[in-house]
């Protein structure tokens, strides 16, 4: 038997039980709901504020400071990417664009698991929860810094 080479992060694919397949089906439905909602929404031209279509109020951070909050533009970037405008999505919120791509990847992975009955294992001891959370935090902070810098350079900020 020839050993199979695996990457440092991903291990071999392993079979899953029927109950686990049902869980992955739920993940697929949740991802589809998020992505479907992003398609349904009309992206706001300002680069933020798309969430107001849910009946939510405008971002109070923008109203008070004139600057975007760390998550300003997330809903807009999801919607823009799902409408086929990746550069506008990056401009609206780079972190949101990355998270939308991650949601698409998770949807496809969950469909794969449901259909095949196998899941690719992740070597969590190499990734680690701390690294994962620090990476997510840096992604959000980096997206926020980018959005503020771009707004100041283009003169769109402060917005009042």
Image (tube, rainbow, N blue to C red):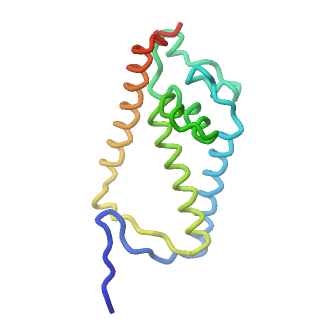
Using the image as rendered, state which of residue 15 and residue 92 is in the foreground.
Answer: 92
Residue 108 figure quarter: bottom right
In this rendering, position of residue 51 left or right of residue 92 = right
In percent of the image, x 51 and y 47: which residue is there? 101
Q: For this view, does 92 lie left or right of residue 36?
A: left
Count all numbered tags in the image, as a single digit. 0
- Measuring 64% from the left and 39% from the top, which residue is drawn there? 83
Question: Does residue 56 lie above or below 79 as drawn?
Answer: above
Q: Residue furthest top?
A: 160
Residue at image coords 50%, 9%: 64
Please say if 71 is above or below 136: above
Decide: is 70 above or below 37. above
Q: Quadrant of residue 121?
A: bottom left
Q: Nearer the viewer, residue 7 or 59?
A: 7
Location of residue 94 in the rendering, given as x and y in whole percent from the top left corner: 45, 34
Residue 59 image position (x, y, % from top left):
56, 19
Residue 23 is situated, as x and y percent measured from the top left of the image, at: 59, 63
Image location of residue 141, percent across then percent down: 37, 30
């Amino acid at each position: 038997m020839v050993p199979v080479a695996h990457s440092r992060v991903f291990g071999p694919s392993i079979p899953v039980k029927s109950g686990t397949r049902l869980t992955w089906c739920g993940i697929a439905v949740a991802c589809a709901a998020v992505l479907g909602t992003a398609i349904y929404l009309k992206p706001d031209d300002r680069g933020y504020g798309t969430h107001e279509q849910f009946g939510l109020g405008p971002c109070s951070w923008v109203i008070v400071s004139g600057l975007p909050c760390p998550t300003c533009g997330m809903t807009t970037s999801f919607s823009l990417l799902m409408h086929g405008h990746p550069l506008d999505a990056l401009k609206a919120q780079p972190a949101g664009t990355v998270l939308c791509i991650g949601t698409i990847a998770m949807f496809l992975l969950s469909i794969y698991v449901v259909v095949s009955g196998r899941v690719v294992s992740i070597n969590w001891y190499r990734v680690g929860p701390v690294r994962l959370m620090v990476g997510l935090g840096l992604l959000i902070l980096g997206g926020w810094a980018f959005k503020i810098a771009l707004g100041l350079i283009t003169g769109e900020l402060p917005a009042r």
